[in-house]
Image: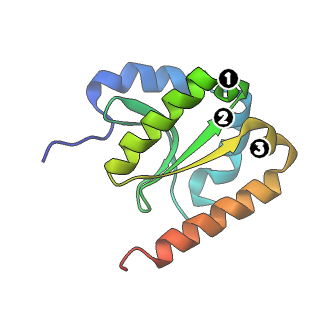
Amino acid sequence: MRTVHNLSIQKRRRKYLRNNSTKAEEFFWQYIKDSQLGYKFRRQHSIKNYIVDFYCPKLKLIVELDGEVHDYILQSNKDYLREEKLKKLGFKVIRYKNEDIKLNTDGVLKNLREVCEYINNNLDK
């Protein structure tokens, strides 16, 4: 079976995105890197032709951070179609607004931890 992860064609784009992260991504990464939530996350991970903000391989969980541009209908529709394709591949997707990352960091981290625990507890079911 051909891999869908980190295809070499996406390597330069992933590196660019890691080196040019949004402020919200940089801030959030400080709280989830090095398995601080009990789960390993990768940032700017590619799956097929998509590059996701954060990815937990063990849980097949994608975390997306959305800025204001995601409020516009055209981008919102693109996000929906992308998410549906990723779900069909067996991935779970959770989204947080950049504003929530900044203003409610503890709440977002608590929610993400709960989501991770729920998925982990239901992996074999």
State how far apart marks 1 and 3 are (Cα): 16 Å
In the image, is residue 124 above or below residue 4? below
Q: Is any part of residue 54 visible from this angle? A: yes
Q: Which mark is residue 66?
A: 2
From the top left corner, tell me how far across and down residue 25 is, in percent: 66, 35
Judged left or right of residue 93, residue 115 is: right
Please give the name of the residue rendered at 40% of the width and 52% of the height, measured from the top-left corner: 91
Q: Is residue 38 visible?
A: no
Please report the residue visible at 72 percent of the width from the left and 34 percent of the height from the top: 24
Please determine whether, in this image, residue 114 is positioned above or below residue 63.
Answer: below
Residue 113 as seen in the image, left or right of residue 103:
left
Q: Nearer the viewer, mark 1 or mark 3?
A: 1
Q: CA distance from mark 2 to mark 3?
A: 10 Å
List the residue tagged with mark 3.
Answer: 101
Q: Is residue 95 above or below residue 74?
A: below
Q: How far across and down, in percent of the image, does residue 66 sit?
A: 66, 34
Q: Decide: marks 1, 2 in contact (CB < 8 A)?
A: yes
The percent coordinates of residue 5 (x first, y second) are 31, 41
Pointer 1: what residue? Answer: 69
Q: What kind of residue is marked 2? A: Asp
91 or 16, nearer to the observer: 91
Earlier in the chain: of badge 2 and badge 3, it is 2
Element carrying mark 2 = strand
Q: Secondary structure at mark 3?
A: helix
